[in-house]
Amino acid sequence: MKRKMSSAILIVLLILCAGCGTSDAGHGEEISEVPTMQIVYENGYSLPQLPLGQEIITYTGESIDYFQWIEPAEQFLKLEDLIDSYEEENYVEKRFQDEKMLSVANDQFFFYTLDYVNSADFLQLASSEFYTGDLFSTSREFKGFSREEAFEKIQAFGAAVGYTFPEKYVAYAMDTEAMEKANQRFMEAGDESAKGATIAQGEFYRFFLQPTKDDLDIFRKEDTYMGAETYVGALVSKEGLEMISAAYVCQYTPDEIVKLVDPSKAQDVIERKYTDIISEEKIYISSCDLCYYQKENHRNQKEVRLSPIYAFSIKTAKKNPEMKIFVDACTGEEIIVE
């Protein structure tokens, strides 16, 4: 299978730096001009406004207990006809009638209806021959079933389990006709598994929800990859929720107040990063935002830290999806994601 719905897609940029010739003063040869990558700031680009005093608070966080969601989720989703279940330490999996599944671990809650979660795979946002983002609209409203109504179903689920879902989101309208076109594209690209694909009959919205804190977006290292998916998502049909996925969601506690470096210094870091590259290509930068970076504590996987960053949205080509480059907003140094 060449496509995956929920895993982040890592695109590694290989830049081949060719050796450049230097002048030979004894022979009077001229120095050749070496092309360097050109940075293009797209329309609307600006540096962010900083809070008063250029100070901001950091947070420590602890993973929420997804296992406490199980009982209220089953009641809200009316999951009553259990077929089988599996349980071990820190993991529960249940299968219900109508191909509904529920799996819960320390770091993730995942409910889905099988046909719908498979059909969500027809939306591919990574830059490749399987890209289908152009087939599904982020503005189309289904007749008698708006995005707002769909999001209300997500909020109602959150109220049932005791979690407030992020209000910032992008939602793609997915219907049978567009999914059939996407599947045809997969077959033309050589995906053998597309020949027997199951396509949901009907309409639904695919939500990508953006977690925030103090009105600032929260990013993790996975968000730096081109075509990466947010770690809170949902599928909603007229009948109700068909998928809810939440991972690495935390409860945050204020930690300390820190001083921010001017965003222009972060921009200088980005400019040096790309103008040092020998290339005739262009790099497109659409935005620079003050955000939070959620870093895991490798000694305690339940703990995280939120620290301020400048997040630059960058494309290596106009047709490519955006990737994020992070600069530490306290030190002015690039955050190298491994």
Image (cartoon, helix red, strand yellow):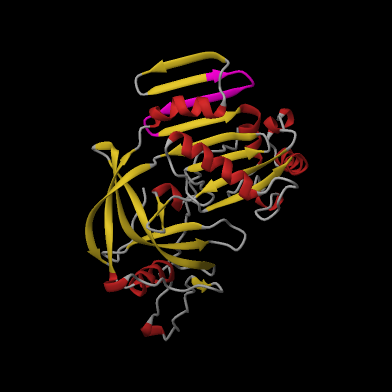
Q: Which residues are magenta?
A: 95-107
When the figure is inspected, residue 55 is found, relative to residue 77, above or below; the finding is: below
Q: Quadrant of the N terminus?
A: top right
52 and 188: which is toward the camera: 52
Given residues 50 and 32, the one toward you in this image is: 50
Q: Residue furthest bottom?
A: 28
Residue at 27 percent across and 39 percent down: it is 298
| Quarter holding residue 106 | top left
| Residue drawn at x 29%, y 66% as measured from the top left | 332
Q: Is residue 271 visible?
A: yes
Task: Name the main secondary structure of what is drawn in magenta.
Answer: strand
- Left or right of 150? Residue 37 is left
Of 134 and 89, which appears nearest the observer?
89
Residue furthest to the left in view is 256
Image spot of residue 220 (x, y percent): 39, 49
> Magenta includes 218?
no
Is residue 104 highlighted in magenta?
A: yes
Residue 169 in percent (x, y) is at 54, 52
- Name the residue: 78% across, 42% down: 177
Residue 213 lies, in percent from the top left, at 38, 54
